[in-house]
Every structure is written in structure tokens, then in C-alpha cells.
Image (spheres, rainbow, N blue to C red):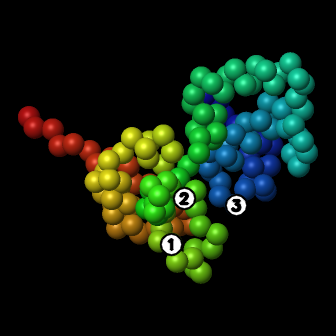
Amino acid sequence: MGKLCPKGKAAAKRKFDVYPSAYANMYASAVCSGKIKPGGKKKTKKKKKKKIYRAATGGGLRKWVSEKWVDIGAPKKDGKFQPCGRKNAKTSKRKYPKCVPLAKAKRMTAGQRTSAVKRKRAKAQGVGGKPTFVSTFKKKKTTA
């Protein structure tokens, strides 16, 4: 993977509050490749959109961005999940969210969901202005 150009990094730092992040790096990469002018709109043609769409079905970062993320720590009464995030952390009644893609949330058992939420909320969040990563599934101990 190549390095990002200084122009792209600077544009991403101006546009996003948190840098580095996945979204900021995608933006910086687009600026470096000339697809986006900093502060402007995308330079794409209709033919190129089809190619981008085909690449999006393959997976990777584009798939990750397009997935529907839900909070498994705040299930609704009907069994569905609320969308990920809170409007305001200080005034919200909801506790710190544990967000996973909807497909993964549906595959998880109730015990796996509660375990993941407990581990997420046990860690100190927002250290250095960034959320703390906690793995969704607990690692199994291997016996030698």
C-alpha cells in the first residue's frame, strides 16, 4: 500500500475531527488520486461509477463502510437493534455503545452479546479523544 501525499493528508485533517481514521484515510487517498478536489465534489463519470460499484461488491473497506452498524448493548423490545451511536454522550440515557454490523449481531447468541458489551464498558473509553477497541468475541485459550 502506497503512502498518502501531503496534500491528501492535509485535506483530511481539515475535513475530519479524528485523524487518522478509516474515513479520513479514504478521503485522503481520493484526494491523492485526483478523484476529489479538496473542498470540492467528486470528479466521476457514469462509466467509472459502474466500475466502482463492481469493486464495492468484493468486500474490504468499501463493504465495511456500506454495512448497517447497530448497537448490541441497547436492543429494542421487539428483538431488533438500535442504530449505532448516540446524539450526545453527556445528555443521553444510553450507555456506551458496542457497535457491530447487523449481520454479525444477528448471528451472535444472547450470551455473546452481553459478554461483548460488558467487556466494552469495562474499559476506559475516549482515552486520547479516541474510542477504545475491544474485540467482539473473547479469544479462546489454547492448551499445549
Left/right placement of residue 87 relative to residue 111 reads right
2 or 3: mark nearer the eye: 2
Residue in the foreground of this view, choosing between 111 and 38: 111
Q: Which residue is mark 1?
A: 94
Question: Sequence-wise, which precedes: disc 1 or disc 2?
Answer: 2
| Image quadrant in which the N terminus is located | top right
> Is residue 133 positioned above or below 41 on the image?
below
Q: Which residue is mark 3?
A: 17
Find residue 79 and report its horizontal and vertical position in percent. Answer: 44, 55
Residue in the foreground of this view, choosing between 67 and 7: 67
Q: Amino acid at mark 2?
A: Gln
> Is residue 37 positioned above or below 18 on the image?
above
Q: Secondary structure at mark 1?
A: loop
Q: Secondary structure at mark 2?
A: strand
Q: Which residue is mark 2?
A: 82
Q: Quadrant of residue 82?
A: bottom right
| Image quadrant in which the C terminus is located | top left
Q: Quadrant of residue 3?
A: top right
Q: Amino acid at mark 3?
A: Asp
Left/right placement of residue 92 relative to residue 97 reads right
Real-space CA distance between mark 3 and mark 1, rounded to the nearest whole angstrom: 23 Å
- Classify mark 2: residues with Cα within 10 Å, few (<14), some (14-19) or many (20+): some
- Classify mark 1: residues with Cα within 10 Å, few (<14), some (14-19) or many (20+): some
- Classify mark 3: residues with Cα within 10 Å, few (<14), some (14-19) or many (20+): few
Q: Secondary structure at mark 3?
A: loop
